[in-house]
Image (cartoon, rainbow, N blue to C red):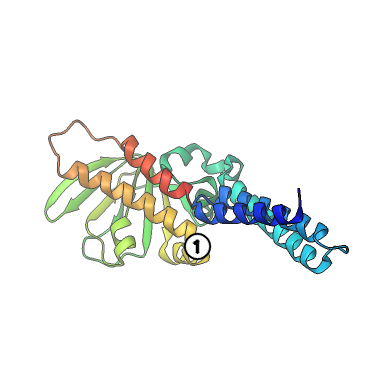
């Protein structure tokens, strides 16, 4: 393959990579293009262009490092062992993002009934009911919800006060986060911020669908498969 052909092939891989949204495929395309550019710099002249080759190799190593981080974040090995039993409840969240979320979580069993939120009052925490159930009072209406739901997600997403009064039954298991911990994690990683907001929005959508259809079959936590697939497709591109 002539040097001129090498540079054209390298350019094609770079262009294809930049046209692809999926980060893993993009990095593989750019890495392949970098390889062709390195060979080009080694053969285009009588003496290899060492400076250009060095920079290309450094770009390649940086790309490999970023690719390794992406793959590690999607591996189930990233799931904390003590929370592995609930990973599948978090819908489309990738293992790496789940690990970040669980890093600042406090998991415990309530000894007595706990009031988690009070309607109209400021809220600085987010909760997830692992087992048991909660009772909710909103604008005079009361109802119970089973485990597998977030509590306080509206206040977290909007920055406003709690939208309902929520009481956790004694013996229920719960996860708890502070708003500051989640804000710091979100500030460090835009990908994690998107993943968290996506899973909270899907949880909220499920609650809204249940609340507007009181005569529908008994509600069970968990999202409809099309909603999960659409969210997974969106995050797959990140």
Residue 138 x %, y %: 17, 54
Q: Nearer the viewer, residue 116 or 39?
A: 39
Residue 108 x %, y %: 45, 48
Residue 182 sits in quarter: bottom left
Q: Residue at x 48, y 41 (%)?
A: 87
Q: Nearer the viewer, residue 178 or 22?
A: 22
Tell me, yes or no, if residue 71 can be seen here: yes
Which residue is label 1 attached to?
185
Within 10 Å of disc 1 (Cα), the crowding (few <14, some 14-19, many 20+) is: some
Farthest residue toward the top?
217
Look at the picture and state if 187 lies above or below 17. below
Tell me, yes or no, if residue 222 can be seen here: no
Residue 63 x %, y %: 66, 57
Give the side of residue 68 with respect to residue 94, left or right: right
Badge count: 1
Q: Secondary structure at mark 1?
A: helix
Residue 141 x %, y %: 12, 50
Farthest residue toward the right?
47
Give the side of residue 233 with respect to residue 71, left or right: left
Q: Residue at x 70, y 61 (%)?
A: 59
Q: Residue at x 57, y 40 (%)?
A: 76
Q: Residue at x 71, y 53 (%)?
A: 6
Residue 228 sits in quarter: top left
């Amino acid at each position: 393959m002539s040097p001129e052909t090498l540079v054209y092939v390298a350019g094609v891989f770079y262009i294809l990579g930049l046209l692809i949204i999926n980060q893993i495929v993009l990095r593989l395309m750019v890495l392949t293009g970098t390889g062709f550019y390195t060979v080009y710099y080694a053969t285009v002249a009588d003496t290899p262009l060492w400076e250009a080759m060095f920079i290309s190799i450094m770009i390649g190593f940086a790309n490999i490092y970023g690719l390794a981080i992406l793959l590690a974040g999607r591996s189930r090995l990233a799931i904390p062992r003590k929370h592995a039993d609930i990973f599948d409840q978090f819908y489309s969240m990738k293992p790496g993002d789940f690990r970040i979320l669980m890093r600042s979580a406090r998991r415990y069993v309530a000894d007595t009934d706990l009031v988690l939120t009070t309607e109209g009052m400021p809220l600085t925490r987010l909760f997830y009911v692992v087992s048991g159930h909660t009772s909710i009072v909103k604008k005079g209406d009361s109802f119970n919800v089973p485990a597998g739901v977030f509590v306080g997600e509206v206040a977290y997403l909007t920055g406003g006060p709690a939208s309902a009064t929520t009481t956790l039954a004694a013996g229920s298991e719960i996860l708890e986060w502070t708003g500051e911990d989640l804000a710091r994690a979100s500030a460090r990683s835009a990908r994690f911020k998107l993943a968290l907001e996506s899973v909270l929005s899907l949880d909220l959508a499920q609650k809204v669908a249940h609340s507007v259809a009181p005569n529908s079959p008994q509600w069970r936590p968990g999202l409809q498969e099309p909603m999960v697939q659409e969210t997974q497709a969106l995050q797959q591109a990140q």
